[in-house]
Image: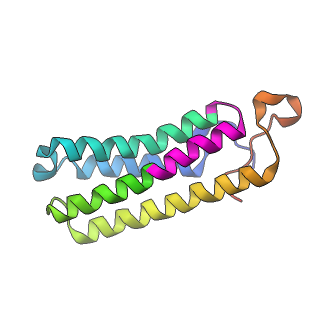
Amino acid sequence: MQIKNFEDLEIWKESRRLTREIYGLSKTEKFSKDFGLRDQIRRAAISIMSNIAEGFERGGNQEFVQFLYIAKSSCGEARSQLYVALDQKYLEQNKVASLLIILKRLSVMIKHLIDHLKRSGLRGPKYGSSNQSRPSDAP
């Protein structure tokens, strides 16, 4: 399947769901009053989906890979911040565990796309008509 828009990427869809979840959980009474952590975890979640989108829109696979690495690192940042929220008792253990699984899975999905793009030899649509198609986000 050819991907024409970043909204078609499964990793972007998953990161959007994750961001929605993070926003919802960070609205709880205790969590919402820790402005620094609340804002930082929201920014990390936003960074994941934004870097996927921005990298895709650059039109070059090498640039896309760079942005995917940033998105992947933001997955790690959000995971770390979830531990802080857990330690401060802003979130329940089972909710944190569920989000950690989602973040780890998303990180693996991003890494698989990075590996696929590196192996593909395609340079991206901005480099000419022979490279107009975008690869799927599955290896």
In the rendered view, would you say 103 is above or below 125?
below
The majority secondary structure of the magenta stretch comes to helix
What are the residue bounds of the magenta stretch? Answer: 57-73
In the rendered view, would you say 93 is above or below 64?
below
Picture residue at 29% right of the left edge, 55% below the top: 81
Question: Residue 32 at x, y = what percent?
Answer: 15, 45
Picture residue at 77% right of the left edge, 32% below the top: 125
Q: Is residue 16 magenta?
A: no
Quadrant of the image occupied by residue 111: bottom right
Question: Residue 20 at x, y = what percent?
Answer: 35, 47
Picture residue at 19% right of the left edge, 46% below the top: 27
The quadrant the C terminus occupies is bottom right
Question: Residue 134 at x, y = what percent?
Answer: 74, 41
Picture residue at 75% right of the left edge, 50% below the top: 1
Question: Residue 12 at x, y = what percent?
Answer: 53, 46
As drawn, is 107 to the left or to the right of 129? left
In the rendered view, would you say 70 is above or below 57?
below
